Image (spheres, rainbow, N blue to C red):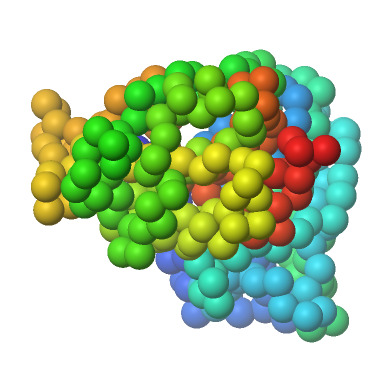
Amino acid sequence: MRTLLVLATVIIVLAAIAAACSSDTKTDSQAVFPIAGNSELVVGANRFGVGLIDEDNRPVLGDAGTKVHLRFLLNDEVRTEQDAIFVWAIPDVNGFWTADVDFDQAGNWSLETDLVRAGEELDVQALPFAVLAQSQYPNVGDGAPPSENLTLATEPNIKKISTDPNPDTAFYQMTITQALAAGKPFVVTFATPAFCQTRFCGPVVDNVKAVRPQFADEVNFIHIEPFVLTDEGQLVEGPGGGPAVAAPMDEWRLLTEPWVFVVDADGRIASRFEGAASTEELTAAIEAVLS
């Protein structure tokens, strides 16, 4: 949660810079500002995300004719590059660009971006970022922590379990511990549709709900609220004055939300998505653990 607040602040600051640049120094070639889409990146496989905001304070979306190519540099040397794919975070409102990147070394990296929109090449500022040797969060290949999240069997009042305005009760039937014991792949989503700082939570929960029918016989699905809720679905105040964090968030060592994890039949994390996750990405990740 704290990290998402920081990222949101960065977006606001860069948007203000973009607006100021637009009014003070209008040029023939507009500058575009990149926004980091990950709270951490680690050595190995990553889903890299970056948002782009132009000088008119508008997000660069995946419109027809818009192409984004990413180059990843370490010590001023291009180590890998690829085209990016656009993912909606809030349908028809905002989103970001993603690429599956394998970082081979920890250190201070940077991103260079080639952007073409409506036939025009736009200048994009470089984005420095750090790659860590190890993840602070559960990562691909790690065992899924066995959590005893609330279910409708232990808490019949769904308002204490979910802030989704249209909850699918199938997401509240099983604990992570039970899912691990079942020996089937499962998908677990940590998100709070009602109290999300980025507004990404509701849409990502909707996307997970959309793919569930296709895999309902082979895969279990779980949704966990990151915060403790009252009987009316409001936030419970924690010891430090902020919202009380639900135990599974601590057990999974998560400091941000939303997250979606796809876990294989052996209980190992096969894919993880921070922030938005499209139905296409989710479908591909689930099909991979079933193949």
Considering only vertical position in the picture, is 19 above or below 154? below
The front one of 23 and 265 is 265
Residue 109 rendering spot, x and y as whole percentages: 71, 32
The front one of 184 and 89 is 184
Say which quarter of the image contains residue 88. Answer: bottom right
Residue 282 rendering spot, x and y as whole percentages: 66, 51
Residue 210 rendering spot, x and y as whole percentages: 56, 62
Report the residue at 62% width, 24% height from top.
183
Question: In the rendered view, does 214 fall on the left or right side of 45?
Answer: left
Report the residue at 81% width, 23% height from top.
104
Report the residue at 43% width, 66% height from top.
16
Considering only vertical position in the picture, is 248 above or below 69? above
Q: Is residue 81 visible?
A: yes
Considering the image in quadrants, where does the C terminus appear?
Answer: top right
Considering only vertical position in the picture, is 246 above or below 32? above
Question: In the rendered view, does 47 fall on the left or right side of 182?
Answer: right
Report the residue at 65% width, 72% height from top.
61
Say which quarter of the image contains residue 223. Answer: top left
Q: Is residue 268 visible?
A: no
Considering only vertical position in the picture, is 256 above or below 83? above
Residue 35 rendering spot, x and y as whole percentages: 57, 53
